[in-house]
Amino acid sequence: MNGPGEGPAAAPPSASAVWILAARPKTLPAAVAPVLVGMGLAAHHGVFDGLPAVAALVGAVLIQIATNLANDYYDYVRGGDTEERVGPTRVTQAGLIEPAAVKRGMWVTLAAALLVGVYLVQVGGWPIVIIGLASLACAVLYTGGPFPLAYHGLGDVFVFVFFGLVAVSGTYYVQGLAWPADAFLAGVGMGALNTAILVANNLRDIETDARAGKRTLAVRLGRRGSRIEYLLLLAVAFAVPGVGWSVWGWPAAVVVAWAAMIAAAAPLRRVLGFANPAELLPALGETARVVALYGILLGGALALG
């Protein structure tokens, strides 16, 4: 019974709502945007193929969710997530889902991604076997295994490679069965922006990560170095449309992706000017929106131009 003057007790979240929270849907633009760019580039080169493209999109989303679940579980069991952590709710640390259940969810999601990969292997052959297995392994090894990448300053490299170079060029490959140089250029742009999300996240957690022994690149570089990294990543991403237009003959419409620079102003101000880590909380969602806008505009301009 509620006490005098108290409102009704809040109902506990449903199981489905908790699992959606665990999947962290706000991070999914990091997986979707590179695939959209790969689709747009395939259309630009006249090799767009809908079914493999959609399969690549589904596979990318599943791997992102599996990575999120792995981070939730392994950061908790390694002591990286404590009550001192500032940031979105982690379901394991918050006691919303048992650790063993989160781990099972990770493996089930990876199995679903593997099933999608079986189809893509039939389309693309051995290169997709290599890419697929590496992606599945790194989803776990990012925070799990004997040498977790995120704990040794390699998380930024992982994100740049797999959510940039691999995601864009791999999406193109399952449609066009080729590896054009401009697919890797487009991957550089997407990889840089997706890495910027990670930099904002790790910059926010720099103090708690350091105490937990999580030696992210932000911990190694410090606040000043991480701010410079964030700024450089944005600069690289916004240079890509101009290079593609002038060097590889992309349609002039690709410069519409520069409109995302407007959206990038807010998180950039936060990253460069914050004093309290909590001030960086909005920067993650804002940077993710930059990724989504950039991917939609660049991919759409490539396809329609």
Image (tube, helix red, strand yellow):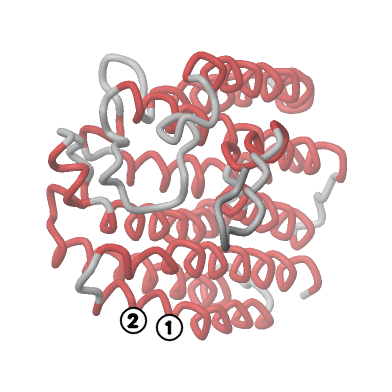
Q: Secondary structure at mark 2?
A: helix
Can you say which quadrant of the picture contains the C terminus?
bottom right
Q: Secondary structure at mark 1?
A: helix
Classify residue 78 as left or right of residue 118. left
Residue matched to label 1: 265
Is residue 168 at all visible to an observer of this figure? no
Is residue 141 at all visible to an observer of this figure? yes
Up-down relation of residue 99 to residue 281 (above or below): above
Q: Are marks 2 and 1 in contact (CB under 8 Å)?
A: yes
Kindly identify the amino acid type of the residue bearing the numbered disc 2: Arg
User: How far, Cα to Cα, is label 2 from label 1?
Assistant: 6 Å
Question: Residue 301's spot in the image, x, y percent?
Answer: 72, 73
Question: Residue 298's spot in the image, x, y percent?
Answer: 64, 69
Residue matched to label 2: 269
Q: Residue at x 56, y 17 (%)?
A: 101
Q: Closest to the observer: 76 or 3? A: 3
